[in-house]
Amino acid sequence: MREAAFVKQNKDKWLKFESVLVNNAEISPDELSSLYIEITDHLSYAQTFYPNSQTLNYLNGLASNAHQKIYKTKKEKKGRLISFWVREFPLAFYEYQKELLISFLIAVLFTAIGAYSSATDGAFVRSILGDGYVNMTLENISKDDPMAVYKKMEETNMFLGITINNIRVALNCFILGIMFGIGTVYMLMRNFIMLGSFQYFFYDKGLLWESARTIWIHGTIEISAIIIAGCAGLVVGNSILFPKTYTRLTSFVRGTKAGLKIIVSTIPFFIIAGFLEGFVTRHTEMPDWLAILIISGSLALIIFYYIIYPIQLNNKLKNEY
């Protein structure tokens, strides 16, 4: 649909809504909330099909004013939390597929660098993983239990510790985006060079499959969520470097809000990954088919929620207008 036709079709609704906000007309919170949802749908559509337009700027201002009015006068509904993950976030995340792809490619690059460096420099693995971890793992390998590290800590403590640490890493990826995205790239570099070194270490010992089918039970979601956190940091960095039609400050505020929503979206996935690492990964005796089922199911969940589902929602929205 052309922008002029889109404006003509919805102009009356926008003006009515603007009148309610400006004149503080009496309206029930539920009705105001319904109008707000419709306006945000229009905003998402405009972000996709009319970027850098006056229509987008107008709807963005209207939605911002509406948000302030709603949440000053109305308590959060129980369904608001569900709505965030089911509709609000996926619609908004469609706009950041490019940053997600870049974060993924950065992760692949540094993983390859970590593996190559380990293959060409015998001391590299120890410099990255530490002598303590390498010596412990070599001892476990000699005892025919190379994945014993996942069995040493009590389940609940391991679950909590891993989950908190992963969320901390994700927050660092996001916050360091303020350094024009360079800080985020640095965090991705640290984590994925370590991943490449880690996997090469087991490959060099003839244990690539044994390590992969164990580690990726929790690592599929964990590593994917870190890549998504990298996307959040890149969104912040891009908002500073490329403000488009906004002032740099306005662009930065918008980018920070968007990045924070991306980070919030990863929290349930980090909890799932922590649970798997604390309670499931330790069962190295599980059959290969079950490990493969968990890994493939985890990968499908991530791909669906962060790639396929946002595209489906936006295509549906496109067809509605």
Image (tube, grey):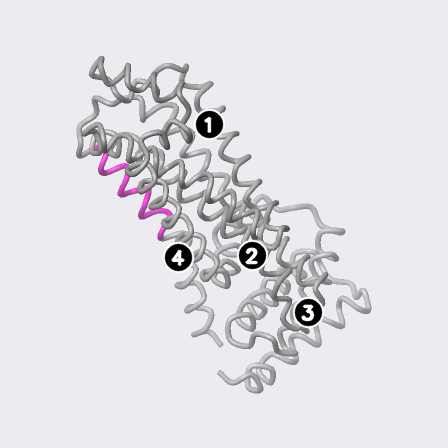
Q: Nearer the viewer, mark 2 or mark 4?
A: 2
Judging depth in this view, the residue of 275 and 225 nearest the camera is: 225
Q: Amino acid at mark 2?
A: Val
The CA span between labels 2 and 4 is 16 Å
| Label 2 with label 4: CB-CB less than 8 Å | no
The residue where tag 1 is placed is 162
| Front-lying residue, 122 or 71 | 122
Residue at which label 3 appears = 246
Residue 74, how many percent across, how many down?
A: 71, 50
Residue shown at 60% from the left, 82% from the top: 7
Q: Earlier in the sequence, mark 2 or mark 4?
A: 2
Would residue 77 be found to the left or right of residue 166 on screen? Answer: right
- The tag earlier along the polypeptide, 3 or 1, is 1
Magenta extent? 290-303
Report the amino acid beneath label 4.
Ile
Residue 235: which numbered mark, if any? 2
**Helix, strand or loop for the magenta stretch, by majority:** helix
Task: Look at mark 4 in the image and give the residue it sits on.
Answer: 307
The x, y position of residue 191, in whole percent, is: 44, 39
Find numbered disc 3 in the image and state the secondary structure of the residue it sits on. Answer: loop
> Label 3 near label 4: C-beta < 8 Å?
no
Residue found at x 28% / y 35%:
200
Q: Is residue 150 magenta?
A: no
Q: Residues within 10 Å of mark 2 (few under 14, many from 20)?
A: many
Q: Nearer the viewer, residue 78 or 120?
A: 120
- At mark 4, the secondary structure is helix
Q: CA distance from mark 1 to mark 4?
A: 26 Å
